[in-house]
Image (spheres, grey):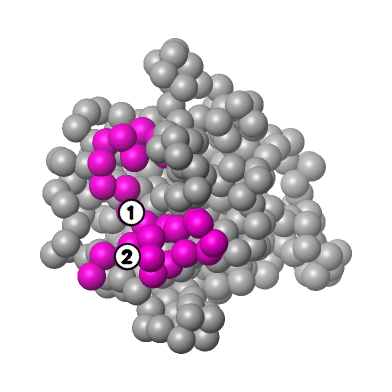
Amino acid sequence: MALTAQNTVINAVSVRLAHTSEEIEAAQRLRYKVFYEEYSAVPSPEMAQTKRDMDDYDQHADHLIVVDESLTDSEESVVGTYRLLRREAAERCGGFYSNGEYDLSPLLSSGLSLLELGRSCVLPEYRTQPILQLLWQGIAGYISDYGIDLMFGCASFQSTDIQAVAKPLSYLHHYHLAPEEIRPRALKGRYINMNIIPKDEITPKEVFSDLPPLIKGYLRVGASIGEGAVIDTQFGTTDVFIIVHTKMVQERYRKHYERKTQKPFPSLGGPEDAPPFTDRTGERS
């Protein structure tokens, strides 16, 4: 059963998978607005011309979209998005996006079913807890549909000044480092030590409250962190590697959804009712 606007809705806002090239392009335009116009990342000439954030991974990934059904312009109605790249899809495009920053060998050899999360963004006026909960409910439905064991990706601090983010990096290193057997490490040449401030000089509650909302959200569902940070010069960020065991996400958001709606937790559409990847974009993006 595919998740529809009718069964996961907050007011007129719904979450679902994009199934057409037009919907994916709308998600790419949203990403451009947030990453390049709001946060001043540096676009390629093609991106600047089309006003779309796009790369080769888009045509192989699934795209979770938040849609405001009250907006009549379909191009403007996509107000939030997440890119979801499963392992079998990543193999069709040479690997995961995170391969460019981290050695994923521990994850790839784990035997677990993997999902990479990326390109997360929401328009400023929709950055409310109910909308973020809606996105997470969508992710929980997706990982249930596809039997995902572990999801991962990079999350960012909006700074390339390591001293400015020394305290949160140190906090993540001391309190949330992933178990060694599944812990990716930043690539040689890009590796930045996160163990900057001694553990006894860190006040966990104080540092946690100042973390970026996305990182806080991951930690609240039991996320752990890879070894080393990476500076992304294109986006002007310092990235850390996030790992989440999906069982905690599914249980948390299943209970939340069923408590609020008194209905069974919905599906996002699994392998049987999802259209082929080649039909989702129709072009390189």
Disc 2 is placed on an element classified as loop
Report if residue 186 lies within the magenta region: no
Q: What residue sits right under mark 2 in the picture? A: 3
Residue 199 numbered tag? none
Q: In which quarter of the image is the N terminus?
A: bottom left
Q: Is residue 11 left or right of residue 145?
A: right
Real-space Cα distance between discs 2 and 1?
Answer: 8 Å
Residue 283 appears in the figure: yes
Q: In which quadrant is the C terminus drawn?
A: top left
Tell me the residue at 74%/36% (across/down).
Answer: 161
Residue corresponding to mark 1: 17
What's the amino acid at mark 2? Leu
Q: What stretch is highlighted in magenta?
A: 1-27
Q: Which residue is at the front of the view, 58 or 202?
A: 58
Side of 104 where 219 appears, left or right: right
Q: Closest to the observer: 41 or 17?
A: 17
- Name the quadrant containing residue 273: bottom left
